Structure formats: C-alpha cells, structure tokens
Amino acid sequence: MINYKITGEMKLSDIVDSDKRALVLFPRFGIEPGFGDHNVEEVCLKRGVDLQFFLLMVNTFLNPDYFPDKQLKRVDVDMLISYLAESHNYYLEEKIPYLQSLINNFKNRVDHPAVLQLEKFFDQYIDEVRDHLAYEDETAFPYMERISAYGKSRLPLEKIDYSVDVFEERHDNIQEKLSDLKNLLVKYFPPAGDRYIRIRLLNELIDFEEDLINHARIEDKVLIPVVRQLEKQVR
C-alpha cells in the first residue's frame, strides 16, 4: 500500500515495486507493462492519457488516505466513465473468470459438504455483480455521457425520465457479500491439503473486495456529485 503522493516524475516501475495493485490499474488507462524506466508523465504523453486525471485516479486507488474532494469533483465525466467502464471490463473478463477457476480448483481438492455451499454462494454473488455492472454500462453510464454532452454544448436537455438520484438509490455495495465468502473459507473448512489454493483464493477475494470498495467510493463520492451538478446546469 502506498502512503505517499505519486507524481509525474516517478517511474511507473517504481510504483509497481511499491504496490503490485498498480499492475491491474494501469491497463485501465491503456498502459501495459513494458514501460521500461519511463516516468508517469512520459508514458501518459506517449499513450495520450491525461496526466492529471491519471494521477488523481492512481493516487485515489492506491492510497486510501488520498481523496482531494475539490480536484476530484472537477474531473471530466467522460474520462471518469471510461475509467470505470474499463474497471468493469477487468472484473468481467479477467478477475471473475480467475476467481471461478480458483473456486473450481478448491472444490476439486476439498472433500467437505460445505464446498457446494461455497460454490453456490459464489455463483449467486457473481450473478449479482454482473447484473450490477450491466445496469451501469447499459443504463446509468449512457445517461451520464448524454448529460455531459449537453453540458459541454450548452444546449437545453430534452425530457429524460431518469436522473442520477435513481442511480444513487439503487447503487448498492456489491462488495459486502465477499465477507461471507471469506468467512466460509477461514472459519468453516477444516485443515486439509488445500492450504496454498485456499490462501491464494483468499488473497484474490481480498484484492477483489478492495478494488470494489474503491470503485464504489469513486462512484459515490465523485461520479454522483459531478453528474448531479451537471444536471443542475442543463435542466
């Protein structure tokens, strides 16, 4: 975990050395490993990434004590939605399939009645996550992009039967049920020859939980207030 502010002069490789989570964060900006000894500013310039937005998101993600309200509430909505949508892609295409493979591996190695309960609970949870993300991708984000477009053009907004208040009302914290999954693994499975796969699974669940917590924090504390302000300007 990083407890200092990342700047444009820092090497990306040094950031990764300090916090491995950067490896799954950078691709959300189109930045993949292979950046050599280049610093943040150089890589952002080369990849066409807005430097200040990159620094805001990376610092907010990697440092839980970093949350500059005034700066975050001035972010470009389209950039923010693009970042959040890339996070969704990572969850759906990489993280969830990997967790599913670990669950299957664990199930095949452990002879215990509760393993079926674990698998069922996980499958139900992932269905909820997919529904949650699909709603944002297909309903909430397109509306917010439309609001942003109207705000930038200064044109009056035609009547739309939706608002950020609707999004906020149904924006539940999908990470909370991960605690139940972790408790099943920690408390209710007896010691067996599954130690390493269990530890790996727990570590991945913890990483996923932390990622979702940060994701929800950005949506609740940044996206919703920014879009609400835009609504006031165009309605």
Image (cartoon, rainbow, N blue to C red):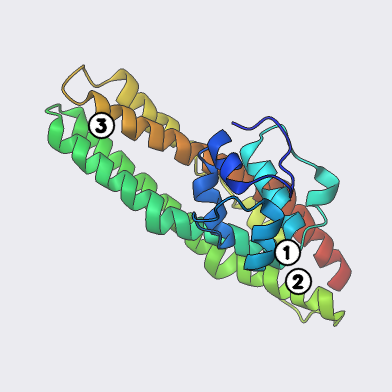
Residue at image coords 60%, 41%: 15
Residue at image coords 37%, 50%: 96
- Please name the amino acid that badge 3 sits on: Ile
Q: Report the residue marked by disc 1.
A: 77
Kindly report the distance in space between the C-alpha atoms of the residues bearing marks 3 and 2.
Answer: 45 Å
Q: Report the residue marked by disc 3.
A: 197
Q: Is residue 56 visible?
A: yes
In-front residue for pair 184/74: 74
- Determine whether, in the image, residue 182 is placed left or right of residue 22: left
Which of the two labelled residues, at mark 3 and mark 2, occupies the earlier sequence position?
Answer: 2
In-front residue for pair 159/42: 42
Dot 2 and dot 1 residues touching (CB under 8 Å)? yes
Picture quadrant of residue 184: top left
Q: Is residue 197 above or below residue 31?
A: above
Q: What kind of element bears circle 3?
A: helix
Name the quarter where the C terminus is drawn.
bottom right
Q: Report the residue marked by disc 2.
A: 148
Which of the two labelled residues, at mark 2 and mark 1, occupies the earlier sequence position?
Answer: 1
- Please name the amino acid that badge 2 sits on: Ser
Q: What kind of element bears circle 2?
A: helix
- Mark in the foreground, 3 or 1: 3
- Mark 3, Cα crowd under 10 Å, few <14 / some 14-19 / many 20+, is some
Residue 195: image x %, image y %? 24, 23
Q: How many marks?
A: 3
Residue at image coords 60%, 47%: 12
Residue 123: image x %, image y %? 30, 47
- Please name the amino acid that badge 1 sits on: Val
